[in-house]
Image: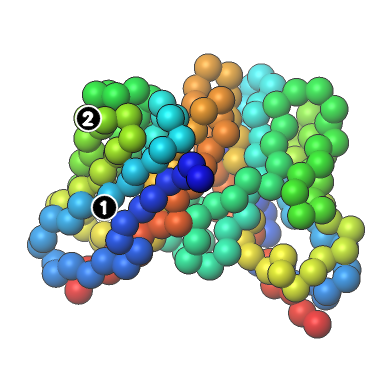
């Protein structure tokens, strides 16, 4: 069965600093990978996704993620964080033939001035 | 604009009462899902439906029930058998693994 691990429960970065959120997945074949963002009390919004092709994926709000098969990772990055990026971020994995995906436990991002 | 509507946003119920959470979508998506979210536990799948009149249990279905009589609607009933129903509930729909989420219902049982 597929699974997702987000090892960092909480991360604090300074505004303007770079950001990397870690995600590791467990799945035998080529996975479908996603990053979502959630503001407090709201639903989830898709930032980016990887299905196939170029392993560096660009998303909305200046985010990018890189699929590394050898490390079973799909880390999310942003070169310069803005205060409005403070939210909770979820990595998710899906598999061929199934619509449903499995979500990680989330990483809460705090941005300090 | 197309989207998913969850109602109500906040819901309070007494212990032992059943309560139904509404989820409606106008995206023409076949698949719909219910997730429960608790702090530090991510999203846990309660039920999902791939087509009308069919649904499957997710990872934490005990104490919950659903129906899918129409493509647009996927209501979730939290029954009195659910031991700890206070949580944030998210509904979603998808096509080609592109998920759209509602804005959630926060259920508090007192």
Q: Are marks 1 and 2 in contact (CB under 8 Å)?
A: no
Quarter of the image for residue B34 reads top left
Give the SS element for disc 1: strand
The number of numbered discs placed on residues in the rendered structure image is 2
Front residue of A39/A65: it is A39
User: What residue is disc 2 on?
Assistant: B69
A8 sits left or right of A113 in the view? left
What residue do we see at 26% from left, 52% from top? B21
Front residue of A70/A92: it is A92
Q: Is residue B95 above or below residue B86?
A: above
Residue B92 appears anywhere in the view: yes
Image spot of residue B53 (x, y percent): 24, 24
- Residue that sits furthest to the bottom in the current view: A113
- Residue that sits furthest to the front in the current view: B1
What residue do we see at 41% from left, 38% from top? B26
Q: Is residue B21 above or below residue A30?
A: below
What residue do we see at 34% from left, 43% from top? B24
- The answer to whether tags 1 and 2 share a subunit is yes
Local crowd size for mark 1, using a 10 Å CA cut-off: few (<14), some (14–19), many (≥20): many
For marks 1 and 2 on the same chain, the one whose residue lies earlier in the sequence: 1
Q: Is residue A50 above or below residue B44?
A: above
Specify the label residue A94 is tagged with: none
User: What residue is disc 1 on?
Assistant: B21
Q: Mark 2 falls within which chain?
A: B
């Amino acid at each position: 069965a597929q699974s997702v691990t987000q090892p960092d429960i909480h991360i604090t970065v300074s505004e303007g600093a770079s950001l990397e959120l870690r995600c590791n997945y467990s799945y035998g074949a080529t996975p479908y990978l996603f990053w979502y963002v959630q503001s407090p009390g709201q639903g989830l919004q898709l930032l980016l996704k990887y299905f196939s092709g170029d392993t560096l994926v660009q998303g909305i709000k200046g985010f990018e993620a890189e699929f590394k098969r050898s490390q079973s990772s799909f880390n999310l990055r942003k070169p310069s964080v803005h205060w409005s990026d403070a939210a909770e971020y979820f990595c998710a994995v899906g598999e061929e033939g199934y619509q449903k995906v499995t979500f990680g436990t989330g990483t809460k991002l705090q941005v300090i001035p | 604009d197309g989207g998913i509507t969850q109602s109500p946003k906040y819901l309070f119920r007494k212990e032992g009462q059943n309560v139904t959470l509404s989820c409606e979508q106008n995206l023409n998506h076949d698949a719909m899902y219910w997730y429960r979210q608790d702090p530090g536990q991510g999203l846990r799948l309660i039920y999902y439906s791939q087509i009308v009149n069919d649904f499957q249990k997710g990872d934490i279905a005990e104490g919950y029930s659903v129906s899918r009589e129409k493509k647009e609607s996927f209501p979730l009933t939290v029954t009195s058998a659910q031991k700890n129903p206070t949580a944030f509930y998210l509904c979603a729909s998808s096509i080609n693994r592109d998920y759209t989420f509602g804005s959630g219902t926060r259920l508090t049982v007192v």
